[in-house]
Image (cartoon, rainbow, N blue to C red):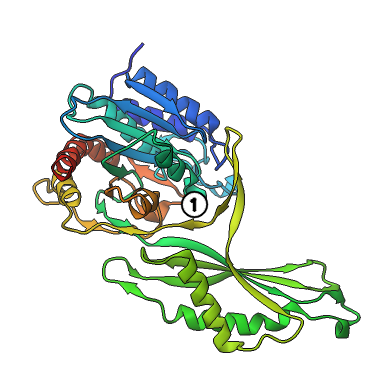
Amino acid sequence: MSREPTFENALAFAGDLIRIPSMSGEEGEVAARLREEMRVLGFDRVEVDGLGSVAGVVKGRGDAPPVMLSCHLDVVAEGAHEEWEHPPFCGDVVDGHLHGRGAMDIKGPMALQVYAAAALANRAPGDVIVGQVVYEERGGWGMEHLVRSGLVNPAAVIIGESTYGDIALGHRGRAQLEVVIRGLASHASAPDRARNALDLLPGVLTGVTALARRQESDPVLGPASLAPTDVRVRPESPNVIPDEVIVVLDWRILPTDTEASLIGRVKDAIAEVLPDVPAGYAIECRLASERQTSYTGRSADRNLLTPGFLMEPDHAVVTAAAGAVGRRGAPDTAARCRPWTFATDGGWTCGVFGIPTIGFAPGEERYAHTNRERLDVEEARWAFSRYPSLILAVQEAAAKKS
């Protein structure tokens, strides 16, 4: 049994993927469906790494280095179903749009990548890898593991996060930090016995607010941004004076930022307001982490940090991609190059591993992670038609660089 790599079949496959819920750590069923489709389409090799990410290969002629197309298998939670205009796991095409969780982030673009690679069988000068990874939505464990494993070794990467047809050349990263204030708990009826951790909260927030106002900026990516997003009190009982308060910070960082530099700047900012922490109290600044478990059963404590990256606008891969894609309605005009507003696995492939990385996919960023998620079918059709030229141009550019 085989299947033709047409847009109509790709769209049907996207609907199938949307109908399979796949939160981070629960991607097993959608990974199995993806492997099945790759085999039916005639991929030369389909493998799964230890975390459950899927890597399929369409072999080239051996005249150029491999290029990897990549999306992710996981999606964010759908929320209340009644708040959706169309059911979140319907995968239906209505009024010219594909609807559902993952329509544009990222199962619609994933289907296009799989079919675009299949369409290049016996045509591409180099191997076309399709690497669809787990755990992107929780910091990128899947991509980090896939590249470190050596299962893939691309000379360039094309990320399928939505760009509305533009070429994305980077983004800010994201770090989640925690400021932990510690004191001494007691019954609320005897506050004199306590060191109320909430007492130092105003000073901590004042320091963080001051730091947020003096963020560095990049000419392309724009300024970093810092915001406190949550305050957790422990114990949570309303009749207990808490001995621990955790202030959660969301920091959209620049590619030059490191874990050590971020923690140091928060410490310094708080010290400007609270130079002498009162006796019986302590303040700790740390990168947030969480225990993550893959659907294959592997577990690890993972820091919640997604690196940023930025490709030079005149890099050969960027200019080749922009020229090959063109603009919808103006094919002879190079595509616009710009950064994403959100973070992607490109922070790992390029920011950490140094692999030239760009983004291209249909879809509007404003629909990501919303209950209105959708993908314009005609825009997707156009993007699908541009993928072969894009892949071949990136391979040619990578071959000249190697």
Measuring from the top left, give residue 384's x and y in whole percent.
Answer: 25, 36
Residue depicted at x 83% and y 74%: 185
Measuring from the top left, give residue 397's x and y in whole percent.
Answer: 15, 43
Residue depicted at x 52% and y 50%: 138
Residue depicted at x 80% and y 76%: 184
Please state which of residues 88 and 66 is positioned toward the viewer in this rendering.
66
Res. 96 visible in picture = no
The quarter of the picture where the C terminus appears is: top left
Label 1 belongs to which residue? 139
- Circle 1: element type: loop
Would residue 319 be found to the left or right of residue 37 on screen?
A: left
Res. 111 visible in picture = yes
Please state which of residues 126 and 115 is positioned toward the viewer in this rendering.
126
For the view shown, which residue lies furthest in the top direction?
A: 1
Measuring from the top left, give residue 159's x and y in whole percent.
Answer: 33, 45
Please state which of residues 365 and 298 is positioned toward the viewer in this rendering.
298
Q: Amino acid at mark 1?
A: Gly
Measuring from the top left, give residue 75's x and y in whole percent.
Answer: 50, 43
The quarter of the picture where the N terminus appears is: top left
Picture quarter containing residue 191? bottom right
